[in-house]
Image (tube, rainbow, N blue to C red):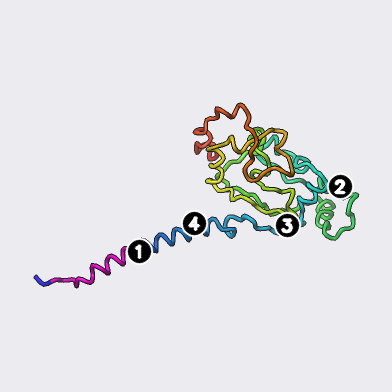
Amino acid sequence: MPQIFHPSMNTISRATIFGAVFILAVLIWLMMTIVRSPYVSGVGVIRSQPVPFSHEHHVAEAGIDCRYCHTSVEQSSFAGIPPTQTCMNCHSQLWTESPMLEPVRASYQKDKPLVWNRVHDLPDFAYFYHNIHVERGVACTTCHGQLAEMPLTWKTSTLYMEWCLECHRDPEKRIGPLAAVFASAGVPSPIISFEPHADWKNARCALLTNCSVCHH
């Protein structure tokens, strides 16, 4: 019986298989790179806002505590976006003629909230509770970075599930004294190296990494 395929087809077959595996690996690498890029994750990207709010000025320079604006961060799952009234508590007397603050004054006069573009926004299927993390000693800078050094606000962490799980698998390295939770400067980010609370020494990490903790 005559040979159907030329012997060279063996070489072509091997090259084709190797090439397909190589291309597949490159595509997977490319996809993972794109998913982790600032274009998708938003890390390092400054979003336009109705007013160019500076945490550096308000926190580091003026010394305003996080909780003055984010009033519900200790009692609620949502940190809270400050209403215009909070801004006007100061700006009814300070920088009253500043063109930059005209949207704030207009919002107050018309009783219409400013529409801020969220910088840290989790998908609807993930449930995050600020109060629980604050009560355990997770500092603001752990997730939000050094806000006190930001003239404008941007993300410093992807907030992807793998990023959250890194902390849930080894929580003792990310928590510290309750008194340092709202520290605005000098706190390492994104990981805090404080001594952990005693009640966390026997924490059941298996429970913290259960799907139902964040997805329920």
| Residue linked to disc 3 | 49
Q: Which of the two labelled residues, at mark 1 and mark 2, occupies the earlier sequence position? A: 1
| Residue linked to disc 1 | 20
Q: Are marks 1 and 2 in contact (CB under 8 Å)?
A: no
Q: Which residues are magenta?
A: 3-17
Would you say 186 lies left or right of 204 here?
right
| Residue linked to disc 4 | 32
Query: Which residue is most to the left?
Result: 1
State the residue at coordinates (61%, 56%).
42
Main secondary structure type of the part rendered in magenta = helix
Q: Secondary structure at mark 3?
A: loop
Snapshot quadrant of residue 64: top right
State the residue at coordinates (59%, 48%).
159
State the residue at coordinates (31%, 66%).
16
Neighbor class of circle 4 (other Cα within 10 Å; few <14, some 14-19, many 20+) is: few
- Disc number lying in front (4 or 2): 4
Q: Which of the two labelled residues, at mark 1 and mark 4, occupies the earlier sequence position? A: 1
- Disc number lying in front (3 or 1): 1
Distance from label 1 to label 2 (Cα)?
64 Å
Q: Secondary structure at mark 2?
A: helix
Q: Position of residue 111 (x, y in %)?
A: 81, 50
Q: Is residue 99 above or below residue 9?
A: above
Snapshot quadrant of residue 18: bottom left
- Quadrant of the drawing holding the N terminus: bottom left
Q: Is residue 50 above or below residue 187?
A: below
| Residue linked to disc 2 | 90
Q: Position of residue 133 (x, y in %)?
A: 64, 36
Q: Position of residue 73 (x, y in %)?
A: 70, 39
Neighbor class of circle 1 (other Cα within 10 Å; few <14, some 14-19, many 20+) is: few
